[in-house]
Amino acid sequence: MTNSKYPFGTKSEATAICRCGQVEITLATETPVLAGFCHCEDCRRAHAAPIYHYVYGSSANICAKTGQFRKGSFELMIMRGFDQLIDAKRDPKEAMFSSFNKNPVVGGIGRLFCKDCGVMMLNAFFMRANTGINPTSKVIEMYGLFTGTFTEKMSSFIESWQPQFHIWCSQATLPLSIFDDGIDKWATWPGGKKWIG
Ligand SMILES: [Zn+2]
Ligand SMILES: [Zn+2]
């Protein structure tokens, strides 16, 4: 983090809005579970973007396992448009991501988009216990927003919200050498092999 070139500010709460405006989601946390970039094929295709930029909180008013609404106050809150959100289908032949039940590292309902405007708005996952990204013995829930849907610039947010790493560099379509941003580049998940090239 010390070599990161990303400027930061003082805010620790963001608002994400879809293109048609029916879905609004907020995230408020001082300590995101993950903040960074993913270059994997699944994220690139899901977002129709060469790079996927996310900030994840650890709790939400939707359950990562069932997709059901939860009453109460959480880091991530679907403020409007809960019923607009649809779980994006995946290729049933794709081994890692056809069902998150088969993925050895992450599980959950996955990627949710606004049914009217098609904007990908939320990832609802959990990290399995005793894995490279979660060495603890407890399952860790994680709920991600995508910075492209934020209403404010990334430099408004505190240091822990700034990108910590690039992951899945082994599946990138962009040349990683263009990112001279001072943060770690991992071949796959954080904590695995560093990406060279
Ligand atoms: Zn929408
Ligand atoms: Zn990815």
Image (cartoon, rainbow, N blue to C red):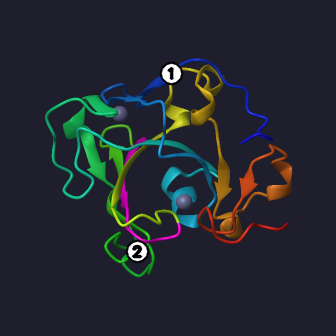
Q: CA distance from mark 2 to mark 1?
A: 32 Å
Depth check: give the residue in front, 139 or 69.
Answer: 139
**Residue at the far front in the pictured view:** 137
* Residue matched to label 1: 151
Please say if 63 is above or below 89: above
Tell me which segment is drawn in magenta. Answer: 119-132
Three-letter code for the amino acid on which mark 1 is drawn: Thr
Tell me the residue at 80%/43% (across/down): 181
Name which residue type carries label 2: Asn
**Label 2: which secondary element:** loop
- Quick one: quadrant of the C terminus? bottom right
Report whether 148 appears left or right of 99: right
Relative to 49, is 6 above or below? above
114 within the magenta span: no
Vertical placement of residue 47 versus 55, above or below: below
Discs 2/1, front: 2
SS at badge 1? loop
Q: Residues within 10 Å of mark 2 (few under 14, many from 20)?
A: some
The image position of residue 5, as x and y in percent, is 79, 35
Q: For the residue carrying disc 1, how many other residues have a C-alpha within 10 Å: few (<14), some (14-19), or many (20+)?
A: few
Report the disc number at residue 110.
none
Image position, residue 162 (x, y; %): 63, 36
Quadrant of res 161: top right
Which residue is pictured at 58% across the width and 17% down the height? 10
Percent x, y for residue 90?
Answer: 38, 67
Name the image quarter holding residue 172. bottom right
**Left or right of 96: which side holds 44?**
right
Is residue 123 highlighted in magenta?
yes
Picture quarter with ligand 2: bottom right
Residue at the disc numbered 2: 103
Q: Residue at x 67, y 51 (%)?
A: 165
Q: Is residue 187 left or right of residue 151?
A: right
